[in-house]
Amino acid sequence: MNVIETYDKNITRAGFFRMLLGLSMIVLLAAAYSSCLCFASENDASDSPANAPASVTTQMQENEVKAGYEQETYRIRFRKNGVLTKAPRALSCTYDKRYRLPGKNEPALDHWNTRKDGKGVSYKPGQRVKNLAAGGKTITLYAIAFSGKNNIEKLTKYLVRQGFTKQAAAGVAGNLMYESGGGPGDIKLNAVEYATGRGIGMVQWTDTTDAPRRTNFERFCASHGKPWPNKDLKVQIDFLMAELSGRYGRVWVFSPSMGYPARYKMSLSKFKKCRNVAMATRAFCANFERPYAKNCGMSTRILFARIALRYVS
């Protein structure tokens, strides 16, 4: 082999190795570039809501829903409609939340209605409602009066709404029918005790050594714009309930000295749950009215209570 042939072979062999080295560099650069693309893609994916952890995604969704509902508000406006002395304050409401309607303690109020004449949609006082309107609108509810035939029906229905059983409510009414002298047809509101004139009103409130009940009643009427004498059922029921609540001291008291059997003794809470109209009448007489048992006219009171029960059954 001459010198020229040997030189040509060495050149060919060197070129071949340089070509291999170049190809290897290209492959390495391509692999590195591909790795960078994958890393960037993974980072982008991890930042998206779809690939966030479940707790984070749920929180984001709740925030979006909350933000949407905060804009869905409405108002409930109330009108006394000749039934109430004062309309309740309007309610500012949020969509999909429940709100309790006022008026449960209003004796003259039977229900709320979307129409002034009572021919719209009705809602009970104390009822929990939601979504009566939306989009910032205002819905107006009108007070609708009890449509009871007489004071007996109005009183018993009101007491039942306050949590008394029908029998307990009738027991109260039977006593008041007897005390006021309005039975069997009704409860007389402007009643004055015939013999002495000491007792007044449907309960015949009387001042005694242990409680100035007549004085408290007269002051209550005057402070509510209905000075005695009056025929206002609402103010008299309001005072009756105030007494039963304990506002004027203990008026629900059993006194053995009045001649009643021990079985007539009953707590007020138990009385409200009583389901025997005769027993309810005896208990209200012995624990609240408290005339002497000997001449209390118990049989007539029970008879009147049975009549009253018909109005609420």
Image: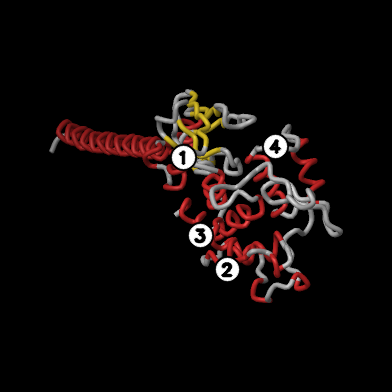
Q: Are marks 1 and 4 in contact (CB under 8 Å)?
A: no
Percent position (x, y) of residue 195? 76, 52
Kindly identify the amino acid type of the residue bearing the numbered disc 1.
Glu
Total numbered labels placed on residues in the image: 4
Kindly identify the amino acid type of the residue bearing the numbered disc 2.
Met
Question: What number is the disc on residue 230?
Answer: 4
Residue on which disc 2 sits: 279
Relative to 246, is 4 above or below? above
Question: What number is the disc on residue 178?
Answer: none
The residues tagged by marks 4 and 3 sit, at their Cα atoms, a distance apart of: 27 Å
Q: In this view, does 41 lie to the left or right of 108?
A: left
- Between disc 4 and disc 2, whose residue precedes? 4
Q: Residue furthest bottom?
A: 262
The residues tagged by marks 2 and 3 sit, at their Cα atoms, a distance apart of: 11 Å
Residue on which disc 3 sits: 306
Give the number of the mark in front: 1 or 4: 4
Relative to 29, is 140 above or below? above
- Between disc 1 and disc 2, whose residue precedes? 1
Kindly identify the amino acid type of the residue bearing the numbered disc 3.
Arg
Residue on which disc 1 sits: 62
Residue drawn at (49%, 41%) of the image: 149
Q: Is residue 53 left or right of residue 274?
A: left
Percent position (x, y) of residue 230? 70, 37
The secondary element bearing badge 1 is classed as helix
Q: For the N terminus, which image quadrant?
A: top left
Name the quadrant containing residue 77: top right
The residues tagged by marks 4 and 2 sit, at their Cα atoms, a distance apart of: 31 Å
